[in-house]
Structures are given as C-alpha cells and as structure tokens.
Amino acid sequence: VSDDTWVLVHDAARPGLPAAALARLIDTCLADPVGGLLALPVADTVQAGHERVERTLDRNGLWLAQTPQMFRAGVLRDALTAAAVNGIAVTDEAPALEAAGYAPLLVPGALRNFKVTWPDDFELMEKWL
C-alpha cells in the first residue's frame, strides 16, 4: 500500500456501523490532509474516581471515539511505529496520530455504532441488526 493511500481501520466489535456514518467519514476525510474518526460528543456527566467520585469532568469538548478511523497509510504507519518505539500506549489509531503531532478530525458518528463490550450489549445490538 502506498503512503498516500487512504486506509479505513474498523473495530469488529462495532457491527452496527450505519452506511450514512461511513459515507460522512469518507467524504469529510477525503477533503482533509490528516483524516479523522467517527466520534460522538459526550452527553452524560463524566465523573472521575475509583469507588467514589473524586471529581466531575467538564464534558464540553469531550468526544467518545468510534471506528472506523481514516488516515493515509504512510502517516498511520509512521504514527503507530513511533508510538510503539516510544512506549506510548494507544487504544486505537487516533491517539497514535495525536502523539505524532497530528490533529485528526472529529466526524459525527452514530449511536448505533457502539462497541459491543458487555453481555447486555449483545442484546441491544441484536435489536439494531
């Protein structure tokens, strides 16, 4: 794959990706030099803590990252390699690009594109599919 080829990376735990969200991501990223990811603005109150609330975070400007994420192959490869070499733990591709100095676009995602993680998620996803 050449460095300038666009690459979509999708998490298999998100089988509910709507075609409209995918099209929105592709159309938006093709017009940007960096690329981006589907994401949802945080709507709930976010609290940090362990067994008790230690503080409430300002949700303004916070987003929940989704996949797919779309970047040029060369930039993505370099960012993931740099993260690995520098011991930077990344949970998906966007944080690797961020650590490499890029600012990926946040493209509005979809609620039904949630990550199937917990047992109850299977029942909910089954209703969507």
Image (cartoon, rainbow, N blue to C red):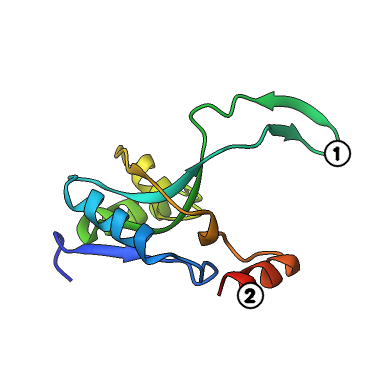
| Amino acid at dot 2 | Glu
Label annotation for residue 51: 1
| Amino acid at dot 1 | Glu
How dense is the environment of label 1, judged by Cα within 10 Å: few (below 14), some, or many (20 and up)?
Answer: few
| Closer-to-camera residue (18/46) | 18
Which mark lies nearer to you, 1 or 2?
A: 2
Percent x, y of residue 7 = 26, 64
| Closer-to-camera residue (34/122) | 122
Residue located at (68% from left, 32% from top): 45
The quarter holding residue 58 reads top right
**Residue 124 visible within the image:** yes
- Which part of the image, by quadrant, shows the N terminus? bottom left
Residue located at (70% from left, 72% from top): 123
In the image, residue 11 above or below residue 90: below
Residue 4 falls left or right of residue 108: left
Q: CA distance from mark 1 to mark 2?
A: 32 Å
- Tag 1, which secondary structure? loop
The quarter holding residue 122 reads bottom right
Residue located at (80% from left, 38% from top): 50
Q: Earlier in the sequence, mark 1 or mark 2?
A: 1
Residue located at (23% from left, 46% from top): 34
Label annotation for residue 66: none
Percent x, y of residue 35 = 26, 49
| Closer-to-camera residue (126/61) | 126
Q: Which residue is mark 2?
A: 126
In the image, residue 27 above or below residue 13: above
- Which part of the image, by quadrant, shows the C terminus? bottom right
Percent x, y of residue 47 = 71, 32
Percent x, y of residue 99 = 38, 41
- Tag 2, which secondary structure? helix
